[in-house]
Image (tube, rainbow, N blue to C red):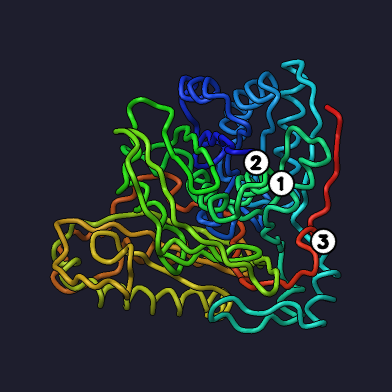
């Protein structure tokens, strides 16, 4: 093909998009439609717990509109990192919604499901063979850490998507994938060069975010041999050379070298030309193939149970001596918790102070006097829900009642917006695997199953 037109509906499936923008995009006769299904940005919980970070109601709404449009136009619909984190339960949830919508709407198509959660025994064998190495400054992965992981996913490149398209799939749902990979797959399969194909993916993965004003909306990207063209489908938004250049810097350790499965996208010599007041052409990108094909592994492990309480104070005397007050509270909690059997090593107590350094904590570079009120999030992570709740109860009580010199309000130091004041949050996970896996075949750990819907 001399060009391929790719339509992205939003930054993430479930974030929503205007139906009119989808209609405007379909009027431009795209060859492929898609959306990124998830991200690692919301943290480790969703991968570990196997749940999406967007509601099923929101995902269903977006899916229904996209399925209707793609099936009517007879074009492929591709979704990477299904269900938010791309594990087995996330993929199955998205597939379940697709099947239900298809039954309700009377839609017929071939569905491909691409798994991204390799069997643990297979990963252990690959680790023993020296095929898994650290990413960045991570320590080497051990068999014990791999065994502790609650869930591990591999971040697939474009090749599994290309195989599914070759085998006639019209709707492709994938587990964890590199965000630009589905789009790169469509363009490379159309025999367009990898450099503009991957660059197009970098734009499309976030929907209309490369435009201004930013918002969750539809973006059309046309890929040709010598570059790409970007245009938002909502008339209230515009792509400008600055908005596109700014977006191309995001989510990477280098602003110009983007490492992907199979190679590196180099944007150091990109040129940004306005085609109109709403569309931009980008050229000059380069692609360097890697000597060894690798995919990123993401894994999380269980870290305990969390319980929180939220409160605030506007006592100027307490705020003036806040570091000493919090140190006293922590000491009281340590002694009282030990008295009822919660040893210090069985939990961690964190008190986030909003209005002073609640966001950056000890890394806060701006030191300034607090305002007239300060908010606190008291957090306890413990081995069991019972210990977490017990320690939090003691911490909350002593935030409320600990005395200090000059104290005027003898009935309580804190105001609590909620009753109950103590809120169980549930299991906690932490990232434990941030490594790369060497592959001989880009598809070897990403099996595909097909269904006739």
Q: Quadrant of the C terminus?
A: top right
Quadrant position of residue 365: bottom left
Q: Are marks 2 and 1 in contact (CB under 8 Å)?
A: yes
Question: Which badge, 3 or 2, is on the more N-terminal residue?
Answer: 2
Residue 280 in view of the camera: yes
Closer to the camera in the image, 262 or 322: 262
* Mark 3 to mark 1 CA distance (whole Å): 14 Å
Indicate the secondary structure of the residue bearing disc 3. Answer: loop
Q: Position of residue 99 (x, y in %)?
A: 77, 28
Question: Which badge, 2 or 1, is on the more N-terminal residue?
Answer: 2
Q: Residue at x 52, y 33 (%)?
A: 9
Indicate the secondary structure of the residue bearing disc 1. Answer: strand
Quadrant position of residue 398: bottom left
Closer to the camera in the image, 125 or 440: 440
Disc 2 residue crowd, few under 14, some 14–19, many 20+, Cα 10 Å: many
Residue 81 in view of the camera: no
The circle drawn on residue 233 is none
């Amino acid at each position: 093909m001399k060009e391929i037109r790719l339509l992205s509906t939003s930054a993430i499936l479930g974030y929503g998009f205007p139906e009119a923008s989808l209609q405007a995009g379909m009027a431009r006769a795209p060859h492929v439609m898609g959306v990124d299904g998830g991200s690692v940005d919301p943290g480790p919980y969703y991968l570990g717990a196997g749940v999406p970070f967007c509601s099923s109601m929101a995902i269903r709404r977006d899916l229904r509109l996209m399925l209707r449009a793609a099936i009517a136009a007879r074009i492929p619909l591709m979704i990477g990192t299904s269900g938010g984190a791309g594990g087995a339960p996330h993929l199955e949830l998205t597939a379940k919604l697709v099947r239900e919508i298809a039954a309700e709407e009377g839609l017929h198509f071939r569905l491909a499901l691409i798994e991204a959660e390799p069997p643990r025994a297979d990963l252990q064998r690959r680790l023993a063979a020296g095929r898994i190495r650290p990413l960045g400054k991570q320590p080497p992965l051990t068999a014990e850490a791999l065994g502790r992981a609650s869930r591990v996913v591999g971040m697939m490149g474009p090749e599994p998507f290309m195989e599914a398209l070759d085998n006639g799939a019209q709707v492709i749902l994938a587990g964890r994938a590199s965000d630009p990979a589905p789009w790169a797959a469509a363009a490379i399969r159309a025999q367009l060069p990898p450099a503009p194909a991957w660059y197009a993916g970098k734009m499309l993965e976030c929907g209309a975010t490369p435009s201004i004003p930013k918002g969750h909306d539809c973006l059309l990207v046309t890929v040709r041999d010598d570059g790409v063209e970007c245009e938002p489908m909502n008339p209230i938004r515009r792509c400008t050379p600055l908005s596109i250049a700014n977006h191309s810097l995001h989510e990477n350790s280098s602003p110009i070298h983007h490492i992907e499965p199979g190679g590196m996208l180099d944007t150091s010599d990109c040129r940004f030309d306005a085609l109109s007041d709403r569309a931009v052409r980008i050229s000059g990108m380069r692609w360097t193939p890697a000597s060894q094909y690798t995919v990123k592994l993401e894994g999380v492990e269980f870290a305990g149970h969390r319980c929180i309480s939220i409160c605030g104070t506007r006592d100027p005397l307490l705020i003036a001596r806040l570091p000493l007050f919090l140190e006293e509270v922590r000491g009281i909690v340590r002694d009282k918790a030990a008295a009822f059997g919660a040893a210090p090593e069985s939990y961690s107590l964190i008190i986030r102070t909003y209005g002073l350094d609640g966001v950056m904590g000890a890394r806060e570079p701006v030191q300034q006097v607090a305002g007239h009120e300060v908010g606190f999030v008291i957090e306890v992570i413990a081995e069991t829900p019972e210990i977490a709740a017990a320690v939090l109860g003691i911490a909350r009580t002593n935030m409320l009642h600990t005395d200090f010199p000059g104290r005027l309000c003898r009935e309580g130091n804190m105001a609590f917006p909620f009753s109950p004041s103590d809120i169980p949050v549930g299991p906690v996970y932490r990232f434990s695997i941030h490594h790369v896996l060497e592959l001989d075949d880009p598809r070897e750990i990403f099996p595909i199953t097909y269904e006739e819907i």
